[in-house]
Each structure stands twice: as structure tokens, then as C-alpha cells.
Image (cartoon, rainbow, N blue to C red):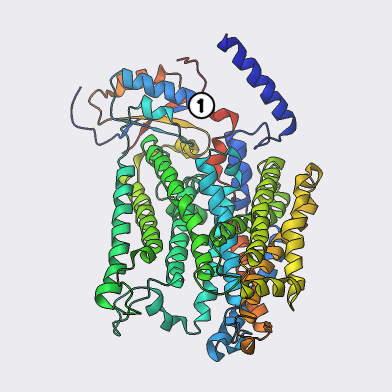
Amino acid sequence: MAHAAQPTQYGLMAEFDSPTALVSAATKARLAGYRKMDAYSPIPIEELNEALDLKRTRLPLLVLLGGIFGGLGGFSLEYWASVIAYPMNIGDRPLNSWPQFIPVTFETTVLGAALTCFVGMWALNRLPQPYHPVFNVDAFSRASTDRFFLVIETADPRFDAHATRKFLEGLHPVGVSDVAP
Amino acid sequence: MDKSHAPAAVSAETAALLSRTPPVIEPGHTFESVTESIGHVVLSKRTPIGWFLGFFIAFILLMVLNLTIGNLLVTGIGIWGNNVPVGWAFDIINFVWWIGIGHAGTLISAILLLFRQQWRTSINRFAEAMTLFAVACAAMFPLLHTGRPWLAIYWLFPYPNTMGLWPQFRSPLIWDVFAVSTYGTVSALFWFTGLVPDMATLRDRAKSPFARRIYGMLALGWRGSAKHWQRYETAYLLLAGISTPLVLSVHSVVSFDFAVSVLPGWHATIFPPYFVAGAIYSGFAMVMTLAIPLRKFYHLEGFITMRHIHNMTKVMLVTGMIVAYGYANEAFFAWYSANPYEEYMMANRMAGPYAVFYWSLIAINAVMIQLFWFRSVRDNIPLLFILSLLVNVGMWLERFIIIVTSLHRDFLPSSWDMYAPTRWDFGMFAGTIGLFLALFFLFIRFLPAIAIFEMRTIVPEAKMKSEHHG
């Protein structure tokens, strides 16, 4: 039933009591053809990456670029300050004394990489985000302690209020609830 | 054959290890119990009376810091005991001491993470906090040594100022500015990143609407999504990988402040590794100093177990021996160089006016730490607390000896003089200890001192079971 998402519902949420149950449920949901879904857990679960078929993140590439940018920026700054803007001739030593510029270049490389990593991770995660529908479910407050959740969104082409609920109930969850938008 | 052989060997080995090695977490903990025991310290309405007492003492010392800084800014750095030829004294000693202490936090949070050392989990959070607070204390000394810090930034930071001046990038002091500010920034990012999932936990468990709101803001809307966790774990690992060379670079750069000069006692190639080892050694001593009362008063013995105490002691033993090797190496090269200035520097350290401090630091950092070889010592918590305090004293004395004895009698006997600190020197040092402790007390009251979500990953419930029942 592919039609526009109903404005009255964000999706259906199934609650599980162990990481194993969540991974098994996520795998089954994917095999059943659901794509627009997400799993929520109080701990990182590596197996979910495969179960939900998550793509590898671009973050390492961004961090590499951030580090290169930081290093080039740091060295350029030193070169510009010491050779162009404020050259000081001391005993006719070379102005571009690059070995002495390495410590600062190293530090700015690290700084560029770390800032990119921090900003990049939150930006790719679209956080901070003050509102999200999953928080409308009361039981979800345990998602940060000891409960595991699988949400199939109404935006999924295969979503059907009745059939999807039946499917989730077949996975032996602790409970299934509607998620208000 | 392989299959039948391997498990038996492993289990026998594991059994043998288990009988002697305490666990990294007390058996019987669950997701809920871990979350509750750590979160309770923060969310509880009742603040222990001991907290107020400790914070009060720290606060008094913090006021001493305000007083000394106030006097310093009004009068000038003449209130300190520094003078020619000892132009650097307490300010740089305390700077190196504090920065060094910070290093253990990064070692625990980053390097031990890369080495997959599970025991780091319960001590990384407060060790990282310790790093941040130590860096804050450290940074204060060189800044205030400029006398007028607000006028000093043009030679500290490269910015287009009206005088058209730029910093001297060939100077180790500028390297220091970059190393320490990068270190402080990266440590803060790493720490905050680690805190976010715990902020979400506190948001969801807080009873008071005010607490829920504050922790909610700090949680950034974290909801534990699998997609988020994937990037989060990648970012955490990357930050650890970035911090690892960073932490080694910071104390190397600090040691360049000395090693790049031509002064006997400073001009030595062993300085970078010797300083890094000393930093980790003193930092672990500080982690121990903080961990022992923390686990006792907040009943966290189930999380910070004897395993952690043992391992920290062993790290101190190893790094302490590297430091002791550094002392031996300095003495050997003073003799082997056949340079009269180097020889005199060493003779002056061993038998000059400051000899008592030299022999005290040798007694602590080279002799006393040999006690850590004994399991009975590693099991004795009150003794370890005293020893860890002594290690911090020993490392402070090391910096005093390196800095003061090298400066006070250099090449020209006509310029020799003695150095003595004034009460303002002591006041500022005590004041930074107050700042450090006050921040630490606030930290354990308002933020989880142990990483809750990381502790959840090591309880048995977190293990995936192989069979898939629908």
C-alpha cells in the first residue's frame, strides 16, 4: 500500500527486553521487506548495522580531510607569518625553517581532525534535535536504560497499520505501540 | 584435533587467571542496576554531608587563588620569588606538574580504548574530567606569568593585530601554546561526546522537571538510534586515535621548552620520553588519589574493583621505572659527556643546596615505587592512597629540581643565586589545588562520574546470544 504518510501516525514501535531479541526482530523486519525503520538501544549493538543494512559512515573520510586542512592551514599560517608578513633575518638563517614549524603543524592537524570529527558526527546524526516522535511513547523512556525498540515508520512503502502491527506482534515483543507524529 | 584441544587449554588458562584476577565489574550487575547505582549519585536529592565538607575546603583554597591572582594583577609578578637567574620557578613547575597529571586521563580514555582494555571503562570518565581540570589549572600559570595576560595574547596567538606583529613560530613556547590549547580542546570534545548518551539516561530518569530540562538540553535529543550509534562509535574511535599521538606530543612539546635551550640539566635528548613517562606516572597517581575516596564514599567498589587498583599500580610501576631510568641517564651523561658544566650541574643537584629535594625525589620515584612489586602492597588500599600522594609530591620535586637547580647555578658563577618561593607562590599553588578539587566536587555531584552506557556494555545482559528464537 504505497501512499503518502498518514499525518496521524509516525510509525509502530515494538519493545524488546534484550539486544538479541532486537537484532533478531530487525533482521526479520528487513527480510519481510521493511526499509524505513530504525532500532533504538541503550548500548551500541554492532550486529544492528548488518541487521538494518546500515551503510558505512562517511565520517572517517571527513576527518581525514579535516586533518589535512588543519595541517595545511597551520603550516601556511607559520609560513606566511615567518616568511611574508614578519620576516626576521637572524644570522642569515632560512626564513622558511620548516622543521621548526612541524610541532604546530602537527597540533593544527590534530585540531582540524578532532573538530571535524565532533561537528561531523553530530551533523550527520542531525543532532541536536529538540523534538522527535519516538519520545511520545511513554515506554520509550527506558530506551536509555534497559529496553530495546524497533520502529517501522509509516513512510515505509510496505507499511500497513494492521498488517505491520500483526507482523511486529509476531516477533514476541514486550509490547507494540503507536507512535504519534 | 585443533578443535578438541583449544577450548580445554583456554578454559584452564582462564580459570587460572580468574582465580587470581578480580573482575572488572562485580558479578550480578544488570543494565538497570548499573544505571541506577551510578545515576543515583547524581539524581539523588540528598547531598552527602562529606561532599559539603570537602567542597568547603576546596572553596576556601579557591578563594586563596582569587586573592593571589588579584594581588598579582594589581602588584605584578614581583610578588613571586622568581628573579634572575631563576626567572622561571613555581609558575613553570606547577604548569608541568598539572599538565602531566592530565595525561593519565587521556591515556585511559584513548590509548587503553584502542588497546581494547576493558578495565578502562569504569575509570575513564572521571579521569577525563581530571584531565580537563588539570589543564585548566596548568594553563593559568604561564598566562599569569605574563603579568598582564590580556596584553599578552598577541605573542601567544596569531591574529592580525594593529602592530603587525606575529608570534615566533620557532619558539617552543609557542609550540606549547598550540599543544596545550589543542589538548584542552580535544579533551573537552572527547569528554562531552562520551557524556551525551549518559545525559539522555539522566534526562529519562530525572524526577525533577528542572533536572530533566538541563540534562535534556545536554543530551542534544539523543535517542539511541542504531544509525546514530554507528556514527557515534566511529567518531569515538577516531577521537581516541587522534588523541593518542596528541597526548604523547603534548608533554614532548612541554619538554622542548627545556630541551631546546642550551642550559646544562635541560639540554638533553632523553627529555621527551622521560617527560611523557613522568606525566603518565604522576597522572595515574592522581587518578588513584581520586578513585580511592570516590569508590569508598559513593560505594562504587563494584565498579572500580581491585582489578582497577592493581592495574593502575602496575602502570605506575612501569612508568615510574622509566622515570628512574631517566634519572640514571641524566647522571650517566653528565659524567660521560666530560663537559665540566654538565658534571657540575649533576654534582650540584646531588650535593648542592637543594640536594635534600633531589634525594627525596629519588627516594620516592626510584626506591619507594619498588613496593608496587608486592601484591600485598597492591591490595592495601590505605597504603596505596598514601603512596599515590607521595608520588605526586615526588613528581613535583622532580620538576622543582630540574628547573631550579639548572637555573640557579649556570655557566657564570658571578650570576649564581639562590631561589626561594614566597607565600604568594605557595598561595597560588594551593589555590589551583582548590580550583581542581572544587571542580571535581561539582563534577561528581552533577555529572555521572562513571560512564553509564559503557558500563552497560560490559554486563552479561549485553552479550548477544547465538540462537535466534523468534
For the residue carrying disc 1, how many other residues have a C-alpha within 10 Å: few (<14), some (14-19), or many (20+)?
Answer: some
Q: Residue furthest left?
A: A3
Q: Nearer the viewer, residue A30 or A158?
A: A30
Element marked by disc 1: loop
Say which quadrant the N terminus of chain A sits in.
top left
Q: Amino acid at mark 1?
A: Ser
Residue B23 to residue B294: above or below: above
Q: Nearer the viewer, residue B445 or B61?
A: B61
Q: Is residue A146 left or right of residue B330?
A: left
- x then y, percent, for residue B350: 74, 70
Q: Quadrant of residue B445?
A: bottom right
Say which quadrant the C terminus of chain A sits in.
top left
- x then y, percent, for residue B315: 65, 48
The answer to whether one can see residue A32 in this image is: yes
- Residue identified by numbered label 1: A18
Q: Chain of mark 1?
A: A
- x then y, percent, for residue B151: 42, 83
Q: Nearer the viewer, residue B111 or A162?
A: B111
